[in-house]
Amino acid sequence: MSQDLPQTTYAILGLLTFGDELTGYEVKQRADATLRFYWVAPAMSQVYKELARLTDLGLVEARTRADGGREVTTYALSPAGEQTLRAWMTETPAGFPVLKHTVLLRLLMSRASDPETVRRMLRAYLDELDAALDDLTGVRESLRSADEPGQAFYYPSVVADWGLDYFVAEARHTRKALERLAEHPDRSDEP
């Protein structure tokens, strides 16, 4: 079955591995708080579409309950979902990540721009990296007290630490690029 499901489906299954039942809205919140740092966080409509698909496949269990006069549906990983996720983890290669780095793409084509625009873009990227570092630091701190081996957020804490290292490295590379651009003025007008 693992060949038939898109990566986002596995991401949503993974968000349900922490032993709690979540509404579609809560799945989206968890995706926004975690996936956005290293994967595309699905849109709300996609979350509900995937939860419906997972329910139809018997990979998640949907429970409807009354909550203050309205019906709320929560979702939990089913035994079949856990088995499918485990099979995907053990039987499919991790694969090499596809990097879609818009800053590097723009830097590659910077001959079509002017040096100050390129430097401004890199400084803006540093600002975005600082904001991402702040956000991910907050996520990492929220995992404390449940991040020891065997605890629910052990693996998410490893991912958060990896992400923090990645953002620090990105900032270092960006600063190096800015230094290189300052040391060697643009020569794009030369033949």
Image: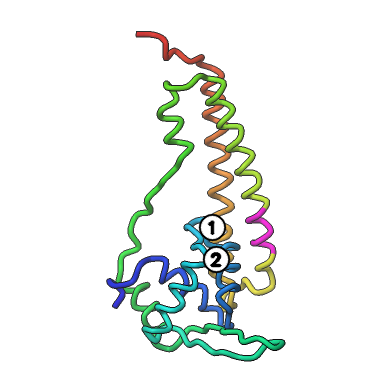
Highlighted magenta segment, given as a residue range: 135-141
Query: x, y percentage for residue 62?
Result: 50, 87
**Residue drawn at (39%, 87%), measured in percent from left and top?**
58
Q: Earlier in the sequence, mark 1 or mark 2?
A: 2
Residue that extends furthest to the right in the rendered view of this protein: 68
**Residue drawn at (53%, 69%), measured in percent from left and top?**
155
Label 2 sits on residue: 31
**Residue drawn at (58%, 62%), measured in percent from left and top?**
32
Residue 24 is covered by the magenta coloring: no
Task: Identify the secondary structure beneath mark 2.
Answer: helix
Foreground pick, 168 / 138: 138
Mark 1 and mark 2: span between their CA atoms?
7 Å
Q: Is residue 172 above or below residue 164?
A: above
Is the residue under label 2 in contact with that under label 1 (CB below 8 Å)?
yes
Query: x, y percentage for residue 67?
Result: 68, 87
Please give the count of numbered marks on the rendered protein: 2
Secondary structure mostly taken by the magenta-highlighted segment of the chain: helix
Kind of residue sitting beneath label 2 = Ala
Q: Is residue 65 above or below residue 181?
A: below
Quarter of the picture containing the N terminus is: bottom left
**Residue drawn at (48%, 57%), measured in percent from left and top?**
40
Quarter of the picture containing the C terminus is: top left
Kind of residue sitting beneath label 1 = Arg
> Which image quadrant for residue 142?
bottom right
Task: Identify the secondary structure beneath mark 1.
Answer: helix
Query: x, y percentage for residue 180?
Result: 52, 23
Q: Is residue 66 above or below residue 156?
A: below
Q: Residues within 10 Å of mark 1 (few under 14, many from 20)?
A: some
Foreground pick, 107 / 155: 107
Would you say 142 lies left or right of 43 here? right
Foreground pick, 14 / 146: 14
Q: Which mark is residue 36?
A: 1
